[in-house]
Image (spheres, rainbow, N blue to C red):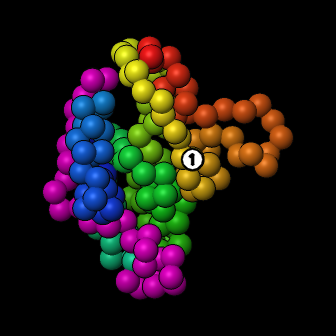
């Protein structure tokens, strides 16, 4: 499968090692990873402050760049949520967007829900703190929200807990 790797602007600028690690993880599980070099910000900062006209060209560009791939994967719950849940407000009934919406995933979500990975072999002898962002919990359902009564789940934790150490 060909995966279009979406690296959000803040990761590109401040945490490029996250992007490189995402490539290694996806390739480890047999994906052919392509990084479209023309990608830009998803437009979330503009959309969040009501600048839809400024965000729209970024959404259109995203759809154009990532449409050819089998899947689009990115290591950011908020940016992936922007694409999946909020581009409709900017793009309307764009058929290319509807197709893209169905194949765009946050990295852990892709591993758990699409590839059905339930264990990553290896060792990591360090204590890990997990921050579950609001967009990932409430909009992508990467884990159960604390205020919801029901069976708890956490996709990131399910990948990390089996690691030795």
Examine the rendered structure and indicate whether residue 30 appears above or below residue 61: above
Q: Name the residue located 44 percent from the left edge and 16 percent from the top edge.
A: 165
Residue 103 visible here: no
Q: Which residues are magenta?
A: 27-54
Instruction: State the residue in front, 112 or 87.
Output: 112
**Image x and y of residue 75, in percent:** 38, 46
**Image x and y of residue 83, in percent:** 45, 60
In the rendered image, the residue lying farthest to the left is: 37
Left or right, 158 with reference to 57: right
> Residue 44 colored magenta?
yes
Q: Name the residue located 62 percent from the left edge and 44 percent from the top edge.
A: 141
The N terminus: image quadrant:
top left
Q: Quadrant of residue 59?
A: bottom left
Query: Mark 1 — residue?
Result: 132
Q: Name the residue located 44 percent from the left edge and 66 percent from the top edge.
A: 94
Q: Name the residue located 30 percent from the left edge and 30 percent from the top edge.
A: 25
């Amino acid at each position: 499968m060909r995966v279009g790797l979406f690296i959000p602007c803040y990761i590109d600028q401040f945490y490029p090692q996250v992007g490189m690690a995402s490539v290694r993880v996806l390739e480890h599980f047999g994906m052919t990873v392509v990084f479209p070099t023309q990608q830009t910000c998803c437009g979330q900062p503009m959309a969040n402050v009501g600048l839809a006209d400024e965000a729209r060209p970024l959404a259109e560009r995203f759809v154009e760049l990532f449409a050819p791939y089998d899947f689009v994967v990115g290591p950011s719950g908020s940016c992936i949520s922007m694409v999946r849940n909020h581009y409709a407000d900017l793009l309307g009934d764009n058929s290319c967007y509807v197709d893209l919406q169905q194949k765009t995933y946050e990295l852990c979500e892709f591993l758990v829900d699409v590839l059905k990975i339930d264990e990553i072999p290896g060792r990591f002898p360090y204590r890990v703190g997990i921050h579950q962002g609001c967009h990932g919990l409430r909009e992508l359902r990467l884990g159960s929200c604390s205020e919801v009564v029901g069976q708890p789940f956490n996709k990131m934790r399910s990948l990390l807990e089996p690691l030795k150490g």
